[in-house]
Image: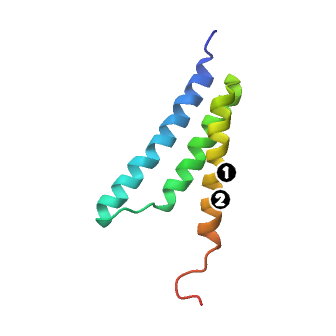
Amino acid sequence: MEIDPVWLAVGFLGQALFSMRFIVQWLSSERKKRSVVPLSFWYLSIAGGATLFAYAIHRSDPVFILGQGAGLFIYARNLHLIHRRPAPGAD
């Protein structure tokens, strides 16, 4: 199978975005001295997951497609829950 360099770059970009979310979460937790999941974690999850999902579709890999597709649903749901909650003190 010949590897298209553009799609290979897309795959590596998706993996880099997806991996950056762990670095962001780790640095945020270190800064606050407790475990936190910053909003940017979820945006990096969506960006990396969507890029890897596109790559998986290109590769026609059903295992990879299912895994990334399910993850995208979970990341989107978390962002929805975060954005629909009322602002602190807005009762």
Residue at 65% x, 55% y: name it.
76
Look at label 1 and name its amino acid.
Answer: Phe
Packing grade of label 2 (10 A; few <14, some 14-19, many >=20) is few
**Dot 2: element:** helix
> Which of the pair 67/39 is nearer the observer?
67
Residue at 51% x, 41% y: name it.
17
Quarter of the image for residue 42 reads bottom right
Q: Is residue 54 above or below residue 23?
A: above
> Which of the pair 3/69 is nearer the observer?
69
Q: Is residue 60 above or below residue 43?
A: above
Residue at 45% x, 41% y: name it.
19
Q: Are marks 1 and 2 in contact (CB under 8 Å)?
A: yes
Q: CA distance from mark 1 to mark 2?
A: 6 Å
Q: Which residue is mark 2?
A: 77
Q: Quadrant of the C terminus?
A: bottom right
Q: Quadrant of the N terminus?
A: top right
